[in-house]
Amino acid sequence: MTTVSTAETLALVDEVLTRRAAEPGALLPILHELQDALGFIPADVVPRIAEALNLSRAEVHGVITYYHHFRSQPAAGRVLQICRAESCKAMGADDLIAHAEHKLGCAMHGHSIDGAYTLEPVYCLGLCASSPALMLGDELHGRMTPQRLDALLAQEAQP
């Protein structure tokens, strides 16, 4: 899918590139800033980023697709990230993921049937002592169980 960014989006990309392109190792900070501002990295800005950093489009695309944090398409609704790091896996994250996939009707990197959520893996939220952990939007939740996840999603549905 080809994205045609708006003039406002391109102006933001140019501002970020102007400010950060000369930094050592600028690609990841640039991608993080754009993802935070736009919610994803539009495909049509990849050549612009590559040119500003004297990289190939393939190199930029490779970084975007390698790291699970970056999206090349907008998320549907709220983003639900479930930790898949070792501590969370040891404390039941796989069962929590299976429950979330069933509850939302989608696999990881997918959108819930109603379009209200995007389900994504994350590799460490820093809540290892409270495993398994997840992040819904910008809110961290530890010691998550399938039942607590159901309650959290039900609370979200309340007006």
Image: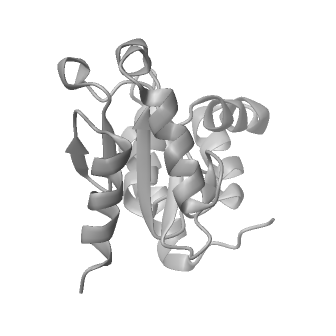
Is any part of residue 133 visible from this angle? yes
Q: Quadrant of the C terminus?
A: bottom left
Q: How is colour applied across the structure in the image?
A: one colour
- Near-viewer residue (50 or 139): 139
Q: Residue furthest bottom?
A: 159
**Residue in view at x 62 percent, y 71 percent:** 113
- Near-viewer residue (5 or 101): 101
Above or below, 88 against 6 in this view is above
**Residue 97 at x, y percent in the picture:** 51, 39
Question: Is 18 situated left or right of 45 in this image?
Answer: left
Q: Residue furthest front?
A: 147
**Residue 31 at x, y percent in the picture:** 49, 42
**Residue in view at x 71 percent, y 38 percent:** 61
Is any part of residue 40 visible from this angle? no
- Near-viewer residue (98 or 50): 98
**Residue in view at x 35 percent, y 57 percent:** 150
Question: Is 37 situated left or right of 13 in this image?
Answer: left
Q: Quadrant of residue 42?
A: bottom right
Q: Quadrant of residue 68?
A: top right
Q: Quadrant of the N terminus?
A: bottom right
Question: Is 11 situated left or right of 149 in this image?
Answer: right
Q: How many marks?
A: 0
**Residue 29 at x, y percent in the picture:** 40, 35
Above or below, 14 against 96 in this view is below
Question: Is 52 situated left or right of 142 in this image?
Answer: right
- Near-viewer residue (98 or 17): 98
